[in-house]
Amino acid sequence: MSVMENRITIQANKEKIGVLLAYIGEKIPNLKLRKLIKLVFLIDERSVKEKGYPLTWLDYYAWEKGPVAREIFDIKNDGGLFSQFIDVNKNEEDGKYIITPNSLFDIEKGMMKFSQNQIDLVDAVLRENGEADADSLTEITHKENTAFC
């Protein structure tokens, strides 16, 4: 996919991705950026395996600690493209970024963009992986038979 095609895809899915990020941030307290990156990947991977297509249509790149969608990584810059949906604060103690839903955003209303099957898929991934730390999720995303490897 070209850079231009990727930008069009992101703009078309920006609201849905933003809602997803806020939803994950609501469901998982003290959500750090690296863990969010892994969870979004695992949601897309599950969607590809079950439905044949990703939920977000983000492009993933192979980085040292696993697949990364740049648009999600870039939220450390005041929420990036998704600032109307999430707040990102840098923890002064460890320097890690904490993601929470934007208090002005109505997550319940936003989730109407998703089908019940999509919500069930997201909830299943969060139930299975939500309590894991980022290092454990990194191990999962490095397995040989992941959807994007």
Image (cartoon, rainbow, N blue to C red):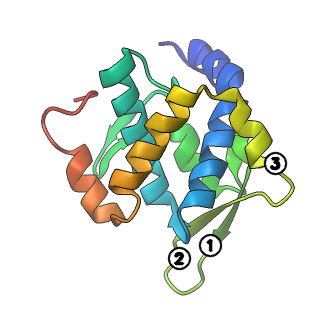
Q: How crowded is the residue under tag 1: few (<14 C-alpha within 10 Å), some, or many (20+)? A: some
**Residue under the point 22% across and 49% down:** 140
Q: Amino acid at mark 2?
A: Gly
Earlier sequence position, callout 3 versus callout 2: 2
**Residue under the point 72% across and 32% down:** 112
Q: Can you give x and y, in whole percent of width and height, for residue 125 in the image?
A: 39, 45
Label 3 vs label 2: CA separation?
28 Å
Label 1: element kind = strand
Report the mark closest to the observer, 3 or 1. 3
Q: How crowded is the residue under tag 3: few (<14 C-alpha within 10 Å), some, or many (20+)? A: some
**Quarter of the rendering containing residue 133:** bottom left
Nearest to the observer: residue 85 or residue 96: 85
Earlier sequence position, callout 2 versus callout 1: 1
Q: Amino acid at mark 3?
A: Asp
- Image marks 3 and 1: residues in contact by CB distance under 8 Å: no
Nearest to the observer: residue 111 or residue 41: 111
Numbered badge on residue 95:
2
Question: Is 28 placed above or below 106 here?
Answer: below
What residue is disc 1 on? Answer: 90
Label 2: element kind = loop
Question: Is 105 placed above or below 133 here?
Answer: above
- Image marks 2 and 1: residues in contact by CB distance under 8 Å: yes
Q: Can you give x and y, in whole percent of width and height, for residue 13 in the image?
A: 66, 24
What residue is disc 3 on? Answer: 106
